[in-house]
Image (tube, helix red, strand yellow):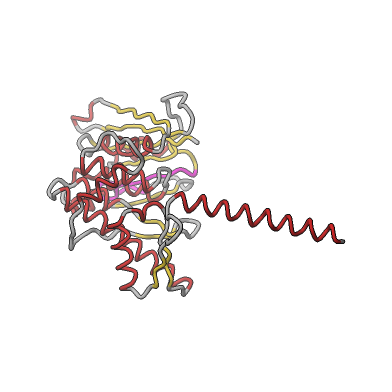
């Protein structure tokens, strides 16, 4: 697996920063990463860009002839990089500044007012962070857990970790109760799977006008709220009012308590792991149970054949 992404726009829109966040999230997963900035006349209003290549194997070349995704934040960037995206690739377009329509019909286009959303979050310099959230929401080739690691790096200045989940643990530890937080957009993808758009969350965590505790608290509250709204949407499809919360992310006590309280207020019966851990330990238990069940079924068939 190898994925290449281009971030392009005016100098000062935080393009290199967004590329660094993506690269850091991928590195947290143990992936091979190549981050290449481009410097030139961007300080005089030209087009600046950076390229991030993420792979499961060593990356052979920094040259990208066909990108899997491109984030374009100004009109010159659309003109320059629309043609470079591979057929079926993703193109994130900042409609706050780009009025032109995308001419190609073989691309997955996400049109989002990145600059306007960044202004609503308090700092229009975070436009590239908003676009990064849209990219991750549509093509989640880095996991939510490692996006949270990147958020911890943004909020807390964490540059190195010595064990998995260290950054999110620090983020949880410094979080404060908040009343206001962004509502993360939720929409189904092409296969009908509900996806959470991280863009407002990334912008909020980069906002320097709030304390670290406030930003960390808002991040937890926004994620818990999104979990509850996903459950409501799924209930409207299936009629099921029982929600099970499992997965390593729910080792975060604050997130677990916020999500549980929110679901119960919405009329859900919430199931939590008791004797089996919610993280990969529970997954391993399930794999063992599946194997034993399969082995027992084979043994039963063999015994039946022997009797025949």
In the figure, residue 27 lies in which quadrant? Answer: top left
Q: Magenta region: which residues?
A: 88-101
Residue placed at 36% from the left, 37% from the top? 28
Residue 47 against residue 229 in the figure, above or below: above
The quarter of the picture where the C terminus appears is bottom right
Residue 263 against residue 87 in the figure, above or below: below
Locate residue 214 relative to residue 109 in the image: left or right.
left
Between residues 31 and 171, which one lies in front from this camera angle? 171
Return the x and y of residue 110 as percentages of the image width and height: 37, 50
Q: How many marks?
A: 0
Considering every residue shown, the one lying at the far right of the view is: 308
Between residues 11 and 223, which one lies in front from this camera angle? 223
Return the x and y of residue 104 as percentages of the image width and height: 44, 45
Locate residue 254 relative to residue 303 in the image: left or right.
left
Residue 93 is one of the magenta-drawn residues:
yes
Between residues 32 and 250, which one lies in front from this camera angle? 250
């Amino acid at each position: 697996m190898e994925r290449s992404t281009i971030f392009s726009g005016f100098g000062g829109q935080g393009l290199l920063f967004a590329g660094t966040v993506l690269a850091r999230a991928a590195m947290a997963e143990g992936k091979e990463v190549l981050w290449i900035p481009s410097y030139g006349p961007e300080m005089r209003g030209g087009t600046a860009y950076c390229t991030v290549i993420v792979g499961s194997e060593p990356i052979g070349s920094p040259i990208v002839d066909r990108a899997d995704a491109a984030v374009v934040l100004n009109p010159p960037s659309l003109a320059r990089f629309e043609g470079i995206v591979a057929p079926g690739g993703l193109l994130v377009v900042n409609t706050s500044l780009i009025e032109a329509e995308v001419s190609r019909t073989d691309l997955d286009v996400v049109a989002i007012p990145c600059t306007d959303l960044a202004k609503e979050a308090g700092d229009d310099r975070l436009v590239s962070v908003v676009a990064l959230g849209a990219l991750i929401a549509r093509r989640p080739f880095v996991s939510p857990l490692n996006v949270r690691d990147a958020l911890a790096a943004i909020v807390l200045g964490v540059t190195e970790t010595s064990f998995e989940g260290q950054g999110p643990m620090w983020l949880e530890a410094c979080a404060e109760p908040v009343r206001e937080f962004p509502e993360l957009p939720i929409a189904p993808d092409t296969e009908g799977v509900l996806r959470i758009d991280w863009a407002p969350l990334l912008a909020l965590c980069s906002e320097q006008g709030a304390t670290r505790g406030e930003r960390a608290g808002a991040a937890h509250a926004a994620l818990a709220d999104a979990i509850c709204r996903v459950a409501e949407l799924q209930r409207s499809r299936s009629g099921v009012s029982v929600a099970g919360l499992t997965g390593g992310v729910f080792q975060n006590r604050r997130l677990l308590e916020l999500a549980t309280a929110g679901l119960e207020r919405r009329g859900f019966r919430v199931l939590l792991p008791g004797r089996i851990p919610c993280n990969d330990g529970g997954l391993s238990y399930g794999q063992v149970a599946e194997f034993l069940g399969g082995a027992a079924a084979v043994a039963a068939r063999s015994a039946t054949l022997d009797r025949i």
